[in-house]
Amino acid sequence: GLSILNQSSETITNFNSLNGLGTDSVFQALVDYTDTVWITTNKGILSAKMSEIQEVVEGKRKTLTVRTYGKSDGLDTGGVTSTSYSLKDSQGRLWFTLVDGFAIYDPVKLGANQHLPRIEIQNYMIDNESYDYHGETIVVPPAAKRLSIKYTGLTSNSPERLQFSYKLEGFESDYSDWQSTRVISYTNMKPGNYTFTVMALNNDGAESLPSVPVHITKKPHIWQRAWFWVVSILLLALGIFFAVRYKIYTMRRYQMQLEKEVEQRTHELKLANEKAEHLLLNILPEEIAVELTENPDRIISKKYPNATVLFTDIVGFTKMSSVMSAEKLVTMLNQLISKFDERAKKEGVEKIKTIGDAYMAATGLSEETEGDSVKKMVQFAIGLLQDVRDFNEVTEAGLQIRVGINTGDLVAGVIGKSKFIYDIWGDTVNVASRMESTGVPMKIHVSEETYAQTKDLFKFGESVDVEVKGKGIMKTYFID
């Protein structure tokens, strides 16, 4: 193609077959004194106005209008070649080297073609139906999707080089760019009246006046007419009237049905309340659950003078969690903790909570005799060790736990308003946790207080002095 450098903006504009040049093979370009650019190409000799080239460079137009020279212009030749050299002499004449001679163009002697073509509308097509045009108004049916208009320019001088610019008033605001097409199609026309005109441009750039206007009417669908909307509004009003009447009737029936549903829902609510109470008993001791149900805004707290607390956790669980998949780890932990829960429920031990692999439980939080609560907890701890052994036989997990027990005073209560939790606090709880952390795998480590109340019921080993944070040296015992 042909490239032009704009030195002020330092940009390059390319002219080729995409923007009106008609070819991508350009051999040479010359400019005459009329500011016409002459271009030799593989398709012959072309010319274009420098003003139009500048408008494309400045972005004012997208395509370039070029003129191709042939026999009708007196240029009877086989064309030019890429090695041909053309020039402009001192008198402003252009010399073009051809494959079969040379041609001379003199801008002074060659006058412009001032014979303007007469434009004629030949026919039009609505969808696939063609009609001859005789000056009548073109009526486009409502369902038609496409209108095509065919036109031409009548001239005796190079009619094949005529270019046209058209406009459909009411559909587009300005005339189109010049182009050689002689058929234009319009789609998606809205109902209404339009006026079509077309202009012609001859081979020397002389423009004709607009053609005689062609009047076009696009008919509306029935639903696009004014009376249709009037009737529709009236029908809508009648529909609303009857809808209101029907609504009143259905509301009366609905009221009767609603009374029956209220009765049914009351029964369902009663069942749901019973289920909620059952769920509450699964997370709170019975007496606490009853008190919380009767007094939901009351702070639930109570001090227990001789309660027993148990802590247990899995030995090496942190290392185990780093090598096992999350799903496998949680499945294993859930199976083991479920065994502990079943045993706690069966033996009357109150599960407090689980924290990761740690399990916390207590006794002595209900109407129990002093010795029974401690005995019950030790028996529960022995059962936990057996549960772990049984679990290892089935799963080959090889788990071990440490168990710590302490007896003493503590405070219990319910914390929070949403997702509340029943918990216990006090020095007794802290020592029980220390018994677990300083214990031995698969052994039950108890404090001196627990030992004192159960020494006649279970077999213990010799006392072991243990350094307990915040307590100093304490005597502790392991159950054999």
Image (cartoon, grey):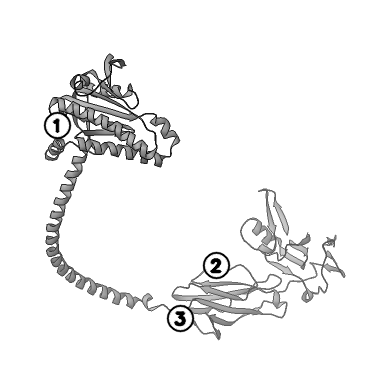
Task: Name the mark on residue 141.
Answer: 3
Q: Nearer the viewer, residue 175 or 279?
A: 279
Locate residue 308 relative to residue 25 in the image: left or right: left
What is the quadrant of the C terminus in the image?
top left
Q: Is residue 247 above or below residue 269?
A: below
Q: Which residue is mark 2?
A: 174
The answer to whether residue 254 is visible is yes
The answer to whether residue 303 is visible is no
Q: Amino acid at mark 3?
A: Pro
Residue located at (13% from left, 39% from top): 290
Q: Position of residue 356 (x, y in %)?
A: 34, 33
Q: Nearer the viewer, residue 456 or 391?
A: 456
Q: Amino acid at mark 2?
A: Asp
Q: Nearer the viewer, residue 114 or 21?
A: 21
Q: Secondary structure at mark 1?
A: loop
Answer few, some or many: residues within 10 Å of disc 2's Cα (few below 14, many 20 plus, some between 14 and 19): few
Q: Amino acid at mark 1?
A: Ser
Q: Secondary structure at mark 3?
A: loop
What is the quadrant of the N terminus in the image?
bottom right
Q: Residue furthest top?
A: 473
Point out the tag, 2 or 3, that comes first from the N-terminus.
3
